[in-house]
Structure formats: C-alpha cells, structure tokens
Amino acid sequence: MKPAPSVIRKLRCAVYTRKSTEEGLEQEFNSLDAQREACEAYVASQKAEGWLLVPDRYDDGGYSGGTLERPALKRLIADIEARRIDVVVVYKIDRLSRALMDFARLVEVFDRNEVTFVSVTQSFNTTTSMGRLTLNVLLSFAQFEREVIGERIRDKFAASRRKGMWMGGWAPLGYDIKNRKLVINETEAEVVRFMFKRFARGIQPQLMIEQLAKEGTRNKNGKPIDKGYLYRILHNRVYLGEAVHKGISYPGEHEAIVERDLWDQAHALIKASPRERTKRPLGRTPALLKGLVFGPSGAAMTPAYTHKGGKLYRYYVSTDVLRTGARASPIKRIAAGQLEAVVIEQVKVLLQSPEIIVTTWRAARKSIEGLTERQVADELRRFDDVWIELFPAEQARIIQLLVQRVDVSETGADITLKVEGLSTILSDLRSATHRRDAA
C-alpha cells in the first residue's frame, strides 16, 4: 500500500519595496518596479514550496528607512497582525529598515505572527540563531551606512550655505526661485520694504496688518498676512542678502531687498524691552508740528495735552508762557487739531503751485534719471489720495520732511517749506503709487 502524498502548505507572500527619494518615481519603470520584479521572480521560483503572491502592493516611494512611519509598511504590519500574510519578501533588508532598533521591533511582530522574512539578495533564515546573528550584522552595517550618508549630506549642506547658496525649500516673500537661485520679485519686494519701513517708523504691527489686508496683500500661499508671518519676515536675514546656517550668517549669492540701516532701525525696536515699547506712541496721534511752530515773538510753541471728561485735548503752547507767565505772548496756546488742519491744507495747495513743481523737479532729477516735469506734477497731484492712506506717524514724518517752520500770528499762519525734502517726498509718492497699483 502506497503512502498518501503529503499536502504542501500554501504560504501567502507579500512583497515590500521602498525608495528614499521621489526622484524618478514618475518614470514608467522605476526603482520600486525593479525591486518588485526581482521579488516576484523569487516567489515564482518557490512555487513548488507552496509560495503564492498576494495581490496587494506594499510600495513606499519617497520614505526614509530610518523611520517606521511609512503608509505601505503600516498596511503590511496590519495585514500581518490580521494573519493574512505568511512570508515577507524584500530585495534587500535595508529596504525594510535601516535602523537596528526598528528592525528588532519588526522581527518581533514577525515572530509573534509566525511570519518568515526573506531577502532576495541576502539569503538567511531568521528562525535560527546563526540567521539572526547574520541579520543583526547586516542591519548594523545598514544603519552605519545611513548615518554616514546623513553626515555627508549635512556637511555638504553646511558647506553650500557657507558659500551663500540657496539649498531649497519655499521661496520667502519677495523672491522667486530660478535655476536653484533666489531672484528678486519686485512686486513682492515692495511689500517687504513697506513692512520694514513702517515698523521702523513705529507703526503698530496690528495696524500694519490691517492696512495690508485693506490693500489685498497676501503671502506666498495666497493667505492674508498675520502677526506671526510679519515677525518671520522681520527676522529673516535672507532679506539682507545673507544665507544662515545654524544661527551663523554668511554672504548670500542673492541680492538684498532691505538695506542694513533699515534693518537696524527695525531691530532696534524689536529688541527694545516691553516697558520701552509701551513708551512709544504707537497708537497715539503724534504732534505733526513738533519743533516747527513759532509764536509772534519768535519763541517756539511746544505740544501739550490735557484730559477733560474722558476726552483728550491737544494744543501747542508758547514756551514764553511756560517760562514767564500768561502775559508773555499775545497767543498763549492754540488747538493742535485746528492748526494742523490749516497747515496740511496749505501744504496741499503749495504742492500744486508751479513754483514748487519746478523746484521739486530740479531737486529730484539728479537722482531719478529721465524724470520729467509733467511726471512730477502728476505725482504731487496724488498727494491728497496718498495722505489719506497714511498712518499718523507717517503723516508726521511727511510734515517734518516738508515743513521748515510755521510762524503763527494773530492774523494766521505762514508756512516755509524745505526744498531738500521735496525730492524725498516725490520718491515716497512714486513708491506708494507703485505699491497701490500692484495691489
């Protein structure tokens, strides 16, 4: 009587593949396909032993072997725990993991679920002590190789940063990436300069954010600029034309957007203590004519204020009155809002006069090539529109640039303009017009 033929146990085989980077994955036949093809051929060669390939694919493209946080690997472990797999097949053991501790955890999962692990190019059996020793030696070399590669990449990155090279990542606001280099985006660069200038002048960040939102300004991702994003810009030394690595700055290959003086002015305010910041009149209306107003006797009139009934009243008071009493000057004090409104209206009228237009053109054409008298007239006519959009601190700066002095008498006020300030105002008007048109 012939013995009954033995029944060959069917072993369900899962092929796992991995590639550290996404480079080349878009190709019709990539590294993952090559690994799978070799593993499937090995499974087919073991058909007589009852090996059968499961239909599911476990492919991790663009994932490091130094972590277990990989989607396909997680699915593989879940199927192993569910007792759907008997053999795990890989091309090389470092495809499964490059970390010795992580691999030990995987082997524990395999043993607990009676799963055999097979490497196509490295033959060993994990069920024997010699096989486990061989596996540990191979894994130690795999982990060593991974650490050496990591050190080499870090050294190359640091060397490149010391040369000022851009090493990838998202382009900061104000720059575009072309040929792996940062190139200035002039429209965005104006926004960055706008932020630095306003912060350096003492504008509250929240007021600046509201102004940017009103103008429709967005960050690189098309989202409104918030306070956190604003401070990231103010601290980013890339705008100085520098490349930073581990807190150390190096001269960068790219051009700077912000000048050193402007950067220093802004950071002098950032570094100020909270108590010093609260002393700055960020939210209060500044005295537009501070140091510019003089009474009938020629004595200066200084800003002052008082509170009555919960309201703030501002005015300019003669220094003669402060020193010697109320009889020292025919004009003891004058309401600040009233005087400032008169001065502002007179400045607007003066800026439209032919004499001022010609004087401004002659002063500005030295620094602005090709500037015409007509262009100057057009820009000065926009002064009224731009003035409305300015914050109080900026309005005060404009007046300080334009006005030499204001002589107050019982019959009115005479204004003397600064010729040297006219070209600066023209540059500011042109910049504001360009920014508004871009928005």
Image: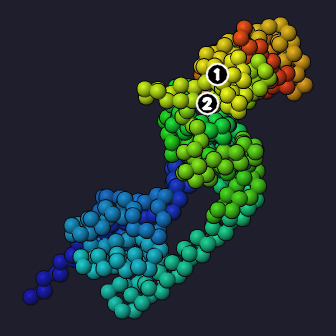
Horizontal side, residue 346 vs residue 7: left or right: right
Residue occupying the point 76% across, 18% down: 296
Distance between mark 1 and mark 2 Cα atoms: 9 Å
Q: Estimate how packed mark 2 is, as few (under 14), some (14 to 19) or many (20 or more) residues with alpha carbons within 10 Å.
A: some
**Position in image of residue 278 (x %, y %):** 54, 45
**Position in image of residue 20 (x %, y %):** 51, 63
Q: Is residue 50 visible?
A: no
Horizontal side, residue 330 vs residue 335: left or right: right
Residue occupying the point 45% across, 64% down: 18
Give the colour scheme shown. Answer: rainbow
**Position in image of residue 337 (x %, y %):** 59, 19
Above or below: residue 281 compared with residue 339: below
Residue holding disc 1: 333
Residue occupying the point 53% across, 82% down: 141
**Could you say whether the residue bearing mark 1 is in a helix, strand or loop?**
strand
**Could you say whether the residue bearing mark 2 is in a helix, strand or loop?**
strand
Is the residue under label 2 in contact with that under label 1 (CB below 8 Å)? yes
